[in-house]
Image (tube, rainbow, N blue to C red):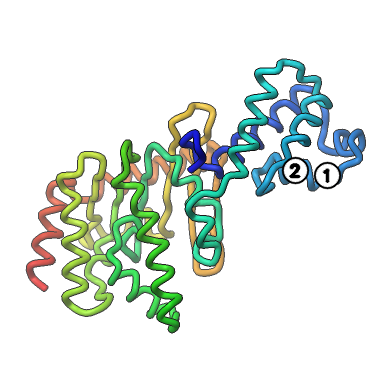
């Protein structure tokens, strides 16, 4: 997080949205701005899409001048965003582990809503569970495994920090009964989930196998909501080979409705915690 408490990834995203808004308000296309400043179109589009990792403060001032922005407060706000976007987040220590912008966005979220089809959600995994997943993925180097676990445990601190996000997870029962690691590791993982019961900001629900076919069978997803109205929610999906961030309102609405339908089919939170405790005891 930056010194102002904001994620640098989110600052970069806000900066890009603001620069696009100012360009469009000035009635200019990317090609027109590119020709005027003798910049490449990719330089402008990368900034607007939040892909410029270290935005140049002087470039922000040049763009403001090109767009006719004269309000010094507006300019200084944009410059501050650019400066904060250049600060390293804790996750930048692990570029080999976190390859997308998701963790930087997650760090700013006020609400995290997730459905998991095949695995325990990452923010609720024990170290032994993580280790078993990595071995299943044929990661053999012990040092690499421990480094990845270290990064993931650091990520989990979001749920125990001051002012944590509201976290709501629905987990397919198949992910809970699948053995990963030895029996004791499996039991500890289930108890870790059950221990979320008293946490007021965390809700865990189990989607039982008895629910039959359900709309979540197409895959897992995460919805991130943010505290500032200007920051649009995002949907995150991950596969074995790629990750995707969806930002269109149509996508947000579709996945929000999907989560509600899954919630209706899942066990209530209290019954889910009882189920998790009983399952752990039976192992």
Residue under the point 43% across and 70% down = 147
Name the residue located 25 percent from the left edge and 55 percent from the top edge.
207
Whole-percent x, y for residue 243 in the image: 54, 59
- Residue 263: give x, y in percent of width and height: 28, 45
Query: Relative to the observer, which residue lies in front, 220 or 4?
Result: 4
Q: CA distance from mark 1 to mark 2?
A: 6 Å
Label 1 with label 2: CB-CB less than 8 Å = yes
Depth check: 14 or 71 in front? 71
Residue shown at the point (16%, 69%) measured from the top left? 187
**Disc 2 on helix, strand or loop?**
helix
Element assignment for label 1: helix
Q: Is residue 86 left or right of residue 148?
A: right
Residue that badge 2 annotates: 45
* Image disc number at residue 41: 1
Q: Would you say 240 lies left or right of 128 here?
A: right
Task: For the C terminus, give its image quadrant.
Answer: bottom left
Quarter residue 212 falls in: bottom left
């Amino acid at each position: 997080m930056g010194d102002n408490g904001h994620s640098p990834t989110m600052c970069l995203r806000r900066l890009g949205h603001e620069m696009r808004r100012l360009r469009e308000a000035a009635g200019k296309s990317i090609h027109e701005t590119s020709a005027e400043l003798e910049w490449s179109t990719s330089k402008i589009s990368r900034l607007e899409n939040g892909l410029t990792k270290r935005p140049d403060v002087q470039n922000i001032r040049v763009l403001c001048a090109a767009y006719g922005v004269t309000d010094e407060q507006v300019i200084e706000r944009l410059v501050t965003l650019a400066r904060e976007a250049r600060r390293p987040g804790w996750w930048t220590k692990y570029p080999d582990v976190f390859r997308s912008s998701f963790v930087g966005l997650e760090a700013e979220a006020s609400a995290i809503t997730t459905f998991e089809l095949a695995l325990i959600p990452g923010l609720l995994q024990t170290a032994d569970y993580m280790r078993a997943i990595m071995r299943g993925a044929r990661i053999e180097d012990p040092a690499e495994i421990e480094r990845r676990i270290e990064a993931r445990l650091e990520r989990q601190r979001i749920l125990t920090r001051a002012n944590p996000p509201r976290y709501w997870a629905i987990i397919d029962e198949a992910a809970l009964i699948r053995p990963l690691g030895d029996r004791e590791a499996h039991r500890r993982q289930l108890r870790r989930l059950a221990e979320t019961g008293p946490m007021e900001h965390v809700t865990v629900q189990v989607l039982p196998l008895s629910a039959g076919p359900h709309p979540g069978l197409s895959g897992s997803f995460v919805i991130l909501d943010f505290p500032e109205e200007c920051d649009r929610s995002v949907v995150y999906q991950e596969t074995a080979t790629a990750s995707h961030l969806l930002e269109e309102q149509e996508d947000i609405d579709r996945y929000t409705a999907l989560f509600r339908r899954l919630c209706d089919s899942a066990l209530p939170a209290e019954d889910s915690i009882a189920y998790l405790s009983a399952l752990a005891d039976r192992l």
